[in-house]
Amino acid sequence: MAIQKVKQNVFSIGMKDWDRRLFDELIPLPDGTSYNAYLVEGSDKTALIDTVDPETVNVLYDNLTNHGVSKIDYIIANHAEQDHSGGIPAILSKYPESKVVTNEKCKNMLIDLLKIPDDKFIVIKDEESLSLGDKTLQFFLTPWVHWPETMVTYLKEEHILFSCDFLGSHYVSSELFVKDETKVYTSAKRYYAEIMMPFRKNIVRYLEKLEDLEIDMVAPSHGQIFDNPKLIFDAYKDWTSDNVKNKIVIPYVSMHGSTKKMVEYLTDALIKRDIMVKPFNLTVTDIGELAIELVDAATIVIGSPTVLAGPHPSVAYAAFLANMLRPKVKFATVIGSYGWGGKMVENVVGMLGNLKVEILSTVIVKGFPEKSDFLALDDLADEILNKHKQLNL
Ligand code: FEO
């Protein structure tokens, strides 16, 4: 796989995974992904910043050989998750004089996860620097984006921030640097939604901290390098802010058409009120698309039939996921149908405990909706409109 030059004596040397379509056995990857490792050759020392997924370590291994790397002094581990750290044992075997440079928490996790011996580590603290001769690496601890040990590495002389997962995207391209900003923006937003959104408040603090650095490039460990870092920093500032948009997402399932009819009616009612609305039929939805829209929606309306007294299992999954991802949504409610009884609404609302939402009026229909039910949906649309107006949306 091609080695690509980032700057003088700085190379992208990792793996482009064009075919991967699922991450963590959970996250759809419509555009594949990459595991970016970076080689930084100083006048005295050589550092490898992160490695690759263990399944693909032979690619990194061959790249290092083909590049003529005879010695690696430091393997920088920004993150213990195996898609970046999993190649460390193989690289340590090839370059036994190498030391793994990371923070205390990451060291302990790497010992647990990969059984790397204790004496292989150099432990650094927040803002500590490491000289490679004419180049200097500085480390900034950024815990909980998205694991407790995460950190980023700054190459001072070249003004490159190696951000690992942070600011990254599951997107693979032959081009090293971002060219199609619209495409990458959407991929990065999907990635933020799925991985980073639960840690929004921490990210705000780290963005402020990193603002003190002069950064010409952001080189994440997934996706392309931002040589216009403003694009990704501005996007993150927007996504992590408390601001929401005049937008509603409606994840739903319908078994026999009742809930679907209600969702269609409510969607039209919201359009008539000039509110952006995005219904997601969960039987055909890429869950990442739903996550993207949750990043800045003001309201979530969950639509479900009643199945064995509770929500449809696909609705339960979507509600559980939304609760895990902790979007900054302000309002929520439930619409749907039942045949003879149940506790569908209570079950769904009970699954949203992480969300700091006001629960709006629910509309639950016995059988197929009739005129009074559509009027109730009109009332709900008005209620949403008024709530959004109160937020000046
Ligand atoms: Fe790309 Fe958290 O690993």
Image (tube, rainbow, N blue to C red):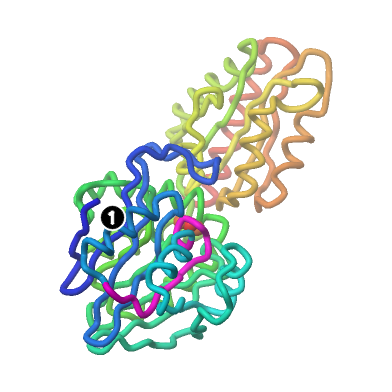
Q: What kind of residue is marked 1?
A: Gln
| 79 inside magenta stretch | yes
165 is higher (above) or lower (below) than 75? above
| 381 inside magenta stretch | no
Q: Residues within 10 Å of mark 1 (few under 14, many from 20)?
A: many
Residue at 65% over, 49% down: 357
Residue 338 in the image: state x and y as whole percent: 75, 17
Residue 237 visible in this rendered orientation of the protein: no
> Would you say 225 lies left or right of 292 here?
left
Residue at 24% over, 82% down: 42
Q: Looking at the rendering, which quadrant does residue 304 occupy?
A: top right
Residue at 55% over, 41% down: 25
Residue 377 in the image: state x and y as whole percent: 62, 24
> Would you say 10 lies left or right of 311 here?
left
Pointer 1 residue: 224
Residue 7 in the image: state x and y as whole percent: 18, 70
176 is higher (above) or lower (below) than 338? below
Q: Which residues are magenta?
A: 70-85
Residue at 75% over, 14% down: 366
Residue 107 visible in this rendered orientation of the protein: yes
Residue 155 in the image: state x and y as whole percent: 30, 78
> Would you say 366 lies left or right of 158 here?
right
**In-front residue for pair 24/349:** 24
133 is higher (above) or lower (below) than 51? below
312 is higher (above) or lower (below) than 328? above
